[in-house]
């Protein structure tokens, strides 16, 4: 492999690994840089919606994806590391034809290593915003979850809390209405901020109790969640709820710090990209949860990774 690879892929999750697989099969050289091999799949607990695997778990699925990419190690070099910045070299180096997007991208890791490439596919994902209260970390995936689409079916017949009154909280409640026995919604503001059309689905359902001005204080349990305590901010009185599931839906933060000065982000810090992974910068593609994608799911991230790799291949073929 030369010093310049065709594509640097940032992110070792399903979007990045699928992009690497498709690029390798197009005979493109790839440097795949990521911190956590498997990405958020590793943290996903039980997975029941990856087509072809009725039930698997995050570690098993992540390992299978990594093995699949390793089959193409002649084309794909993997680097464990954290990307600190991405820039574009200028002027156009002689190694590349001049013309559209001829300059190379330079991806720099936190330990100062530089990787030059003709194109970049950025797939660094996002991380759920956490409550940062006692018990949250201990019971993550043991009753505390950040993904209703993924985990709601695991709480059949249970009492659960949804924390957060925005659209993702409302969607979580709607999903849980058919599954859970009782649903408490805790919102720290004085009203739900989800779209009224969503709230209308559950605000009169006797199994749903909505509490506003509620500040969640701590989560308790033994091997699994058994309850939480919140404070009514108007009275300062603390209340305890006995529940077996806690859905934290207070937003997610795209991992875009390394590129915040490189490309324009949307107000939520996600990368605007079209369905082909094309962004506002020629040669810089994006896929998966780090984009303005609506559905943060493994199958969607993988599909977007595929499209971004094919777009990058097309871009490189025209340089
Ligand atoms: C608790 C939980 C449960 C879930 N359950 C399911 C489920 O059951 N089914 C489902 O379909 N989806 C589920 N999801 C969602 C799913 O995990 C994501 O949609 C999917 O992993 C997104 O893939 P991605 O490749 O876009 O990003 P990620 O999987 O987040 O991968 C991003 C990669 O980028 C790396 N990275 C980040 N910043 C940098 C940097 N600066 N430099 C280098 N590397 C970096 C990360 O380490 C990681 O390797 C769940 C998510 C969570 C949090």
Image (cartoon, rainbow, N blue to C red):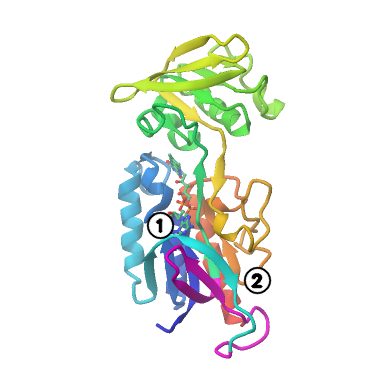
Which residue does the image show at 60% across and 28% down from the upper left?
170
Q: Is residue 131 above or below residue 12?
A: above
Magenta run includes residue 102: yes
Q: Position of residue 139 (x, y in %)?
A: 36, 30
**Residue 57 drawn at (x, y percent):** 33, 43
Q: Secondary structure at mark 2?
A: loop
Instruction: Quadrant for the C terminus, please.
Output: bottom right
Which of the 4 image quarters holds residue 63? bottom left
Measured in 3D between alpha carbons, the distance from the residue under mark 2 to the one under mark 1, in whole angstroms, is: 25 Å
User: Callout 2: 10 Å neighbours few (<14), some, many (20+)?
Assistant: some
Asked if residue 88 can be seen in this view, the reply is yes
- Residue pointed to by mark 2: 282
Name the residue rendered at 42%, 17% in the picture.
243
Residue at point 71%, 26% (across, down): 196
Q: Are marks 2 and 1 in contact (CB under 8 Å)?
A: no
User: In the drawing, what numbered circle is on residue 158?
Assistant: none
Image position, residue 206 (x, y; %): 56, 11
Residue 113 image point, x, y percent: 44, 71
Q: Secondary structure at mark 1?
A: loop
Q: Is mark 1 within 8 Å of ligand 1?
A: yes
Answer few, some or many: residues within 10 Å of disc 1's Cα (few below 14, many 20 plus, some between 14 and 19): some
Relative placement, left or right, of 212 versus 246 is right
In the image, residue 225 lies in the stretch drawn in magenta: no
Which residues, given as a range, are shown in magenta?
94-119
């Amino acid at each position: 492999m030369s010093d310049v690879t065709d594509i640097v892929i940032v992110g070792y999750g399903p979007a990045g690994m699928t992009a690497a697989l498709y690029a390798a099969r197009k005979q493109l050289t790839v440097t795949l840089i990521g911190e956590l091999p498997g990405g958020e799949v590793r943290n996903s607990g039980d997975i029941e919606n990856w087509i072809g695997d009725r039930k698997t778990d995050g570690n098993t699925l992540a390992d299978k994806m990594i093995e699949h990419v390793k089959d193409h190690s002649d084309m794909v070099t993997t680097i464990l590391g954290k990307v600190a910045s991405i820039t574009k070299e200028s002027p156009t180096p002689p190694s590349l034809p001049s013309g559209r997007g001829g300059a190379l991208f330079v991806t720099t890791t936190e330990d100062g290593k530089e990787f030059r490439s003709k194109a970049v596919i950025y797939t660094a994902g996002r991380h759920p915003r956490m409550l940062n209260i006692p018990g949250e970390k201990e019971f993550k995936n043991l009753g505390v979850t950040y993904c209703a689409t993924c985990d709601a079916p695991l709480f059949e017949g249970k009492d659960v809390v949804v924390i957060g009154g925005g659209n993702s909280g409302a969607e979580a409640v709607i999903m849980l209405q058919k599954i859970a026995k009782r649903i408490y919604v805790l919102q720290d503001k004085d009203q739900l901020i989800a779209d009224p059309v969503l709230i209308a689905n559950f605000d009169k359902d006797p199994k749903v109790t909505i509490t506003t001005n509620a500040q969640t204080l701590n989560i308790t349990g033994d091997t699994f969640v058994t309850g939480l305590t919140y404070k009514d901010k108007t009275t300062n009185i603390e209340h305890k709820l006995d529940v077996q599931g806690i859905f934290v839906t207070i937003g997610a933060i795209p991992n875009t710090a390394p590129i915040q000065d490189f490309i324009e982000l949307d107000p939520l810090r996600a990368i605007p990209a079209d369905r082909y992974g094309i962004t506002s910068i020629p040669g810089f593609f994006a896929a998966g949860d780090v984009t303005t994608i609506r559905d943060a799911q493994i199958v969607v991230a993988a599909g977007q990774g595929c499209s971004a790799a094919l777009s990058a291949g097309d871009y490189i073929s025209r340089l």
